[in-house]
């Protein structure tokens, strides 16, 4: 009688953008609003309006624009206080801005035993507390900390566009996976979607 060897289950990698894909809003802006309230938030955006216009015109990079915004609102904040803020934000705000259908698909992948990874231009400080609930890995922009304080600068390149591809390939050997899913909603997600055997753009 022929004995067939048991086949190993196929490995599946799933890459989820966060802001705009899993969520309905930009989480950095929501974090600022959560910390300072709507009045100081909008006053801050007015102060930043020249920078935002230069970003739209292509004269200021997204990396630098993010650093300017983070510096205005959070420079010299202790990392301990910022981490506490990020944890409260992940509990009080993020669940309310998660897209229900996106969460349903996210959880379905986890139930199937797929390796699910959040790949985001937002900072890991406020994404990881939410992702930890699902035991999900996070690849994100990381904030610089000097002498225990947030500086407002990024310790890593802004995790967007081709940087998403670079960071994914640094962490995963795609040839080890039979299928790679990727979910995104913006131009900055397109390079990551091109990595996938099953890309989904604005699916939710």
Image: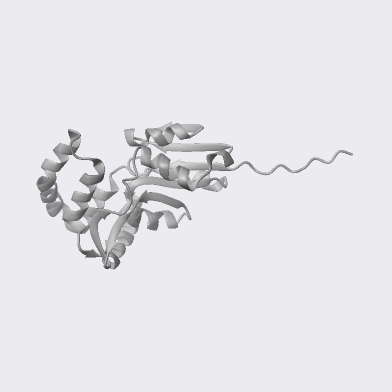
Q: Quadrant of residue 91?
A: bottom left
Model colouring: one colour
Q: Residue at x 10, y 50 (%)?
A: 43
Location of the C terminus by quadrant is: top left
Q: Is residue 46 visible?
A: yes
Q: Residue at x 42, y 47 (%)?
A: 118
Q: Residue at x 17, y 57 (%)?
A: 36
Q: Quadrant of residue 52?
A: top left
Q: Nearer the viewer, residue 141 or 4?
A: 141
| Rendering coords of residue 108 (x, y %) | 51, 44
Relative placement, left or right, of 113 versus 193 is right
Q: Is residue 104 visible?
A: no
Location of the N terminus by quadrant is: top right
Q: Nearer the viewer, residue 95 or 62?
A: 62
| Rendering coords of residue 6 (x, y %) | 74, 43
Relative placement, left or right, of 4 versus 106 is right
Relative placement, left or right, of 200 versus 188 is right
| Rendering coords of residue 142 (x, y %) | 33, 53
In this rendering, the count of numbered labels is 0
Check the image and name the residue furthest to the right: 1
Q: Quadrant of residue 16?
A: top left
| Rendering coords of residue 50 (x, y %) | 11, 41
Q: Residue at x 65, y 43 (%)?
A: 9
Q: Nearer the viewer, residue 146 or 82?
A: 146
């Amino acid at each position: 009688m022929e004995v067939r060897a048991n086949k190993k289950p196929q490995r599946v990698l799933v890459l989820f953008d966060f802001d705009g894909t899993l969520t309905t809003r930009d989480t950095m802006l929501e974090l600022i609003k959560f910390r300072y309230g709507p009045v100081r938030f909008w006053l801050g955006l007015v102060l930043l309006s020249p920078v935002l216009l230069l970003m739209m015109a292509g004269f200021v990079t997204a990396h630098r624009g993010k650093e300017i915004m983070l510096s205005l609102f959070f420079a010299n904040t202790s990392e301990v206080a910022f981490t506490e803020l990020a944890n409260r934000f992940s509990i009080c705000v993020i669940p309310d801005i998660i897209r229900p259908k996106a969460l349903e698909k996210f959880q379905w992948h986890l139930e199937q035993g797929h390796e699910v990874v959040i790949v985001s231009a937002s900072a890991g400080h406020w994404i990881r507390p939410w992702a930890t609930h699902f035991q999900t890995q996070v690849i994100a922009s990381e904030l610089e900390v000097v002498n225990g304080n947030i500086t407002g600068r990024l310790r890593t390149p802004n995790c967007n566009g081709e940087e998403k591809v670079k960071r994914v390939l640094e962490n995963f050997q795609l040839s080890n996976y039979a299928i790679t899913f990727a979910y995104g909603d913006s131009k900055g997600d397109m390079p990551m979607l091109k990595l996938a055997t099953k890309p989904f753009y604005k699916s939710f």
